[in-house]
Image (cartoon, rainbow, N blue to C red):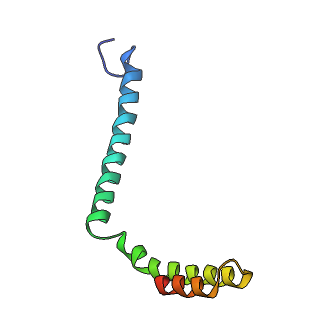
Amino acid sequence: MGYWGYGPYYHNFEFGGIIMIIWCFLIVWLIIAILRFVFGGHRHRHDQMPENDSDEALKILKQRYARGEISKKEFDDIKKDIT
């Protein structure tokens, strides 16, 4: 009972090893997330978004005008804001 791996302490030792592995993965994941944030891994997606959003908004605006939901004046005003 005094040795590691025997007796009631054996199960606690296994569980402690699993917890240690989980902590190691969490620490590595945290380091990678911080590095991606600091060195701009998220910037590429934001640079492309305004063009796609603007094109999509103009498409929706044209559809609303074609259905008669908005007037020509409203269409022109909104189009100026979008572009």
Task: Give the residue at the far top of this rendering.
Answer: 1
Residue at position x 30%, y 63% in the image: 37
Q: Nearer the viewer, residue 2 or 68?
A: 68
- Image quadrant assignment for residue 2: top left
In the visual, does 12 lie left or right of 81?
left
Examine the rendered structure and indicate whether residue 50 appears above or below residue 33: below
Task: Give the residue at the far right of this rendering.
Answer: 67
Residue 66 x, y percent position in the rendering? 71, 85
- Picture mark count: 0
Residue at position x 58%, y 82% in the image: 74
Residue 40 x, y percent position in the rendering? 30, 70
Q: Nearer the viewer, residue 61 or 44?
A: 61
In the visual, does 69 lie left or right of 16?
right
Residue at position x 43%, y 74% in the image: 45
Examine the rendered structure and indicate whether residue 62 appears above or below residue 46: below
Residue 43 x, y percent position in the rendering? 35, 73
Residue 12 x, y percent position in the rendering? 38, 22
The quadrant in which the N terminus is found is top left
Q: Nearer the viewer, residue 45 or 83?
A: 83
Q: Nearer the viewer, residue 60 or 26?
A: 60
